[in-house]
Image (cartoon, rainbow, N blue to C red):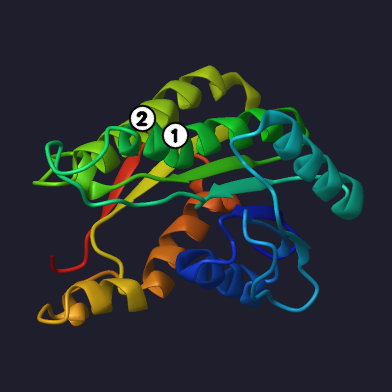
């Protein structure tokens, strides 16, 4: 990853921070974008907080700032998103469009803004975060799984669209991530069976690297021992 210019969206969260830290250790030049105003970042990273990634204008401006500051763009890692557990009967229907906006629209908007700049890279890469739960949704997972299924479809369609441009598009499909929030929500579970954010970061960075040029349109399960 040395010398590669990488944008991480949702960069101030648990997974985004793990990806940013791993990329920095590998020598990447980083730009971190998040809806939150501020958050942790490796030394030297460009931090762009307060960006609504579902808004095309804000997203284009953020990506343009990255290119202006760092001189280009090699990889986009779309981590921005959200989660709600809710049965269909037990909660408001606005969870469905809300999660679609948080997960699917933000990924599509960031991809669209990044594509013109990724075309100028010798090895353009997009890595999205889908969900293993979107392959078979459990109770209360309908809205979340539907929004992540949209990310899967976006990944596969965009991979075909960008084949001629030397841009690969892939997605990782994690199961339960070992985060403080998940530990609090599931106190009786064994977090050792879950996916460590640092482990998922390594998979994402492989897909974002030059060595992964033969992989595109892949939905890669990263499920630990769940």
The answer to which quarter of the image holds residue 70 is bottom right
Q: Residue at x 20, y 81 (%)?
A: 192
Q: Which mark is residue 150?
A: 2
The answer to which quarter of the image holds residue 103 is top left
- Residue 105 horizontal/vertical position (percent): 50, 32
Q: Residue at x 30, y 67 (%)?
A: 177
Image marks 1 and 2: residues in contact by CB distance under 8 Å: yes
Q: Nearer the viewer, residue 88 or 46?
A: 88
Q: Residue at x 69, y 77 (%)?
A: 42
Q: Which mark is residue 149?
A: none
Res. 118 in view: no
Neighbours of disc 1 within 10 Å: few (<14), some (14-19), many (20+): many
- Residue 43 horizontal/vertical position (percent): 76, 79
Image mark count: 2
Label 2: state its secondary structure.
helix
- Residue 197 horizontal/vertical position (percent): 40, 71
Judging by the rendered image, the residue that carries numbered circle 1 is 104
215 relative position to 178: left or right: right
- Residue 91 horizontal/vertical position (percent): 21, 42
Neighbours of disc 2 within 10 Å: few (<14), some (14-19), many (20+): some
Question: Which callout, 1 or 2, points at the residue further toward the start of the chain?
Answer: 1
Label 1: state its secondary structure.
helix
223 relative position to 25: left or right: left
Q: Quadrant of the C terminus?
A: bottom left
Above or below, 24 against 173 in this view is below
Above or below, 160 against 223 in this view is above
30 relative position to 105: left or right: right
Q: Quadrant of the N terminus?
A: bottom right
Res. 89 in view: yes
């Amino acid at each position: 990853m040395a010398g590669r210019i990488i944008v991480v969206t949702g960069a101030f969260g648990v997974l985004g921070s793990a990806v940013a830290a791993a990329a920095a250790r590998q020598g990447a030049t980083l730009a971190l974008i998040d809806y939150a105003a501020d958050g942790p970042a490796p030394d030297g990273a460009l931090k762009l907080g307060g960006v609504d990634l579902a808004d095309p204008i804000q997203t284009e401006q953020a990506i343009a700032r990255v290119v202006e500051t760092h001189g280009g763009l090699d990889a986009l890692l779309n981590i921005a998103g959200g989660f709600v557990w809710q049965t269909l009967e037990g909660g408001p229907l606005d969870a469905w469009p809300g999660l679609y906006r948080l997960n699917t629209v933000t990924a599509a908007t960031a991809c669209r803004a990044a594509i013109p700049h990724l075309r100028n890279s010798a090895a353009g890469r997009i890595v999205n975060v889908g969900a293993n739960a979107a392959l078979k949704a459990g109770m209360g997972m309908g809205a979340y799984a539907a929004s992540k299924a949209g990310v899967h479809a976006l990944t596969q369609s965009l991979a075909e669209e960008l084949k001629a441009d030397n841009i690969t598009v892939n997605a990782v499909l994690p199961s339960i991530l070992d985060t403080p929030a998940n530990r609090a929500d599931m106190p009786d579970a064994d977090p050792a069976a879950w996916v460590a954010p640092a482990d998922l970061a390594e998979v994402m960075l492989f897909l974002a690297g030059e060595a992964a040029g033969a992989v595109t349109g892949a939905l890669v399960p990263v499920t630990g021992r769940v």
